[in-house]
Image (tube, grey):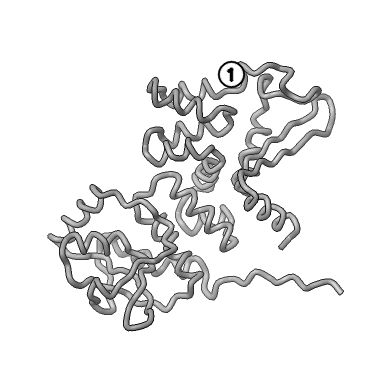
Amino acid sequence: MKPVKEKRRGLGRGLSALMADVEPSPGESPEAPRRADRQIPVERISPNPDQPRRQFTRDALQELANSIAEKGVIQPLIVRPREGDRFEIVAGERRWRAAQMAQLHEVPVIIRDFTDTEVLEVAIIENIQRADLNPVEEAMGYRQLMDRFGHTQEKLATALGKSRSHIANLLRLLNLPEPVLDMLRAGDISAGHARALVPCEDAIGLAQRIVAQGLSVRDTEKAAKPGADTKKPDQQPAGFLSEATGKDADTRALEGDLSAHLGLKVSVEHKAGTEGGKLVLHYKSLEQLDDLCRRLAGE
């Protein structure tokens, strides 16, 4: 008897319903204060340990703290109750940190009884919608929403007010080597530079050239084009279109869409003069390989 596969359980409420807790009401300006449930001392509030945002810039926090010291916390934090009359932040950790820097003793909160799954989803949505994320953090937020909650690029684009191409282009950045992603996080290279590096075989070397020589995005695109490097033709399998001869725009677009969907680098190598070819999936860790095997098995 075949084991019955467990269906992925959807959230109790939809993405749009969750967003209602992190966005102003229709017709309400983003700066307009929302009505808080109550004021809670800052020491009774704890951050979310699974907060997707990892970097809090000191200067940006200080700027927010100065604003809070003058005007108070305009948008309440969203929290959920915990044991011992304590609360955990669902959305608004930057405001909580800045409020402490401004020496506020209490902050306004909206209390919601979210599940652990909903907490993570709302935290990601709030970060994407409001925080000044770097491109890597934003892309990782989209990837989490897709992998953990089954959201498609189309659904995210509609719900978050982003274009599908914006989401797809950011997801492709996650195929870059970690040293390049570190440069992007630090602001050493721009998202435009990073997009040009995605198809490049030596993305790390070219990224270092961008920083050292101050290459523009257009210069980077030219340097990253197939044939711009010095690979020998015999390095490619016989009978296949090599990077040196170039791939047509449709093939590159297909590679990009598959990469964005799978979260892996994808190479499509069409055998010249035939209907066949190779589809190569590149994984960086055994965890990625296990995840891919589960998805291919339909689990």
Residue at (81, 23) in percent of width and height? 239
Q: Is residue 77 above or below residue 195?
A: below
Q: Residue furthest left?
A: 70
Q: Answer left or right for 293 relative to 212.
A: right
Residue at (38, 82) in percent of width and height? 83
Residue at (34, 49) in percent of width and height? 132
Q: Answer left or right for 68 relative to 268.
A: left
Q: Residue furthest front?
A: 286
The N terminus lies in quadrant: bottom right
Q: Answer left or right for 136 relative to 237.
A: left
In the rendered structure, which amino acid carries the disc numbered 1? Asp
Foreground: 262 or 254?
262
Residue at image mark 1: 229
Residue at (67, 27) in percent of width and height? 248
The C terminus lies in quadrant: bottom right
> Number of callouts in the render?
1
Q: Residue furthest bottom?
A: 84
How crowded is the residue under tag 1: few (<14 C-alpha within 10 Å), some, or many (20+)? some
- How far across and how far down the image is residue 282, in percent? 66, 41
* Residue 93 position by quadrant: bottom left
- How far across and how far down the image is residue 125, in percent? 44, 60
Q: Is residue 119 above or below residue 54?
A: below
Q: Answer left or right for 81 relative to 206.
A: left
Foreground: 95 or 130?
95
- How far across and how far down the image is residue 116, in percent? 48, 72
- How far across and how far down the image is residue 140, in percent? 49, 51
* Residue 236 position by quadrant: top right
Say what secondary structure mark 1 lies in: loop
